[in-house]
Amino acid sequence: MYLSPALLVPLFALALARPQDAAPAAAGSKKNVYLASCTSRSLYIADTASAVVYYNGPVSGSSPADVGVVSEPARDWEGQTRRVTLSAGRFTSSIAASADALLKSQIAGIAKLGDEDLVCFVDGTSTFRFREGLLGLGETTCKADYWCASTDVGT
C-alpha cells in the first residue's frame, strides 16, 4: 500500500499530538485506541485516511504511543474488519454495520490489540491534531469515530 508523505506522521509529531476532546471514560482504561477519520493538509495537498491512534494508558496529558494508517483514502469502519500493526502488536477492529446509527457512548463493536480484548464505543467528538514537516506547515486532523477501551481491569 502506498502512503503519501502528507499522511505519514513523523515520530516527533507524536509528541505534539494531544486529544482536544477525548472521551472522559478513557482515562480509566489500561489501553485506549481511537478509530479515526483523518484529513491531512499541506501547502499543496489534501488527503484523507482512516487511522488508529493508540495510547498505552490514560489519554489525559499524554502523547499517543503510536498512530497507524489503516486505509488511504479514508473508508468507513462500519461493517468491516480493519487491521494495522502498532508498536504494541497487531490491532484488529470489527465495528457493527449499523454502528453509525448508534448514539455516543453506545457499544459499537470489538477489537483486539495483540492478545488483549477491547470493546469499542461510538465517539464522534474526540479530535487529534498532528503538525508535520520541519516548520510545521503540514497538519493532520483526526476525528475519532470510535473509542476502544481495554477490558483488562488488572494492573
Image (cartoon, rainbow, N blue to C red):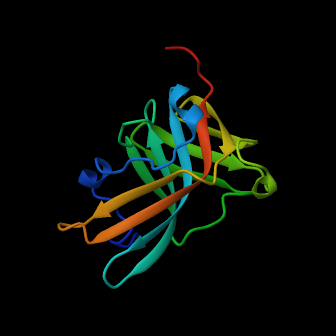
Residue ranking furthest to the top:
155
In terms of image quadrants, where is residue 26?
top right
Which is nearer the eye, 10 or 63? 63
In terms of image quadrants, where is residue 13?
bottom left
- The answer to whether residue 134 is above or below residue 153 is below
Residue ranking furthest to the bottom:
44
Q: Residue at x 63, y 40 (%)?
A: 111
Q: How many marks?
A: 0
Q: Residue at x 32, y 50 (%)?
A: 14
Q: Residue 46 appears at what percent x and percent y? A: 43, 79
Q: Residue 45 appears at what percent x and percent y? A: 38, 82
Q: Residue at x 63, y 46 (%)?
A: 93
Mark yes or no: residue 38 visible: yes
Q: Residue at x 59, y 21 (%)?
A: 152
Which is nearer the eye, 41 or 84? 41
Q: Is residue 75 left or right of residue 69?
A: right
Q: Residue 154 appears at what percent x and percent y? A: 55, 14
- The answer to whether residue 78 is above or below residue 137 is above
Q: Is residue 68 left or right of residue 71?
A: left
Which is nearer the eye, 147 or 152? 147
- The answer to whether residue 27 is above or below residue 137 is above
Q: Residue 84 appears at what percent x and percent y? A: 50, 51
Mark yes or no: residue 1 visible: no
- The answer to whether residue 59 is above or below residue 95 is above
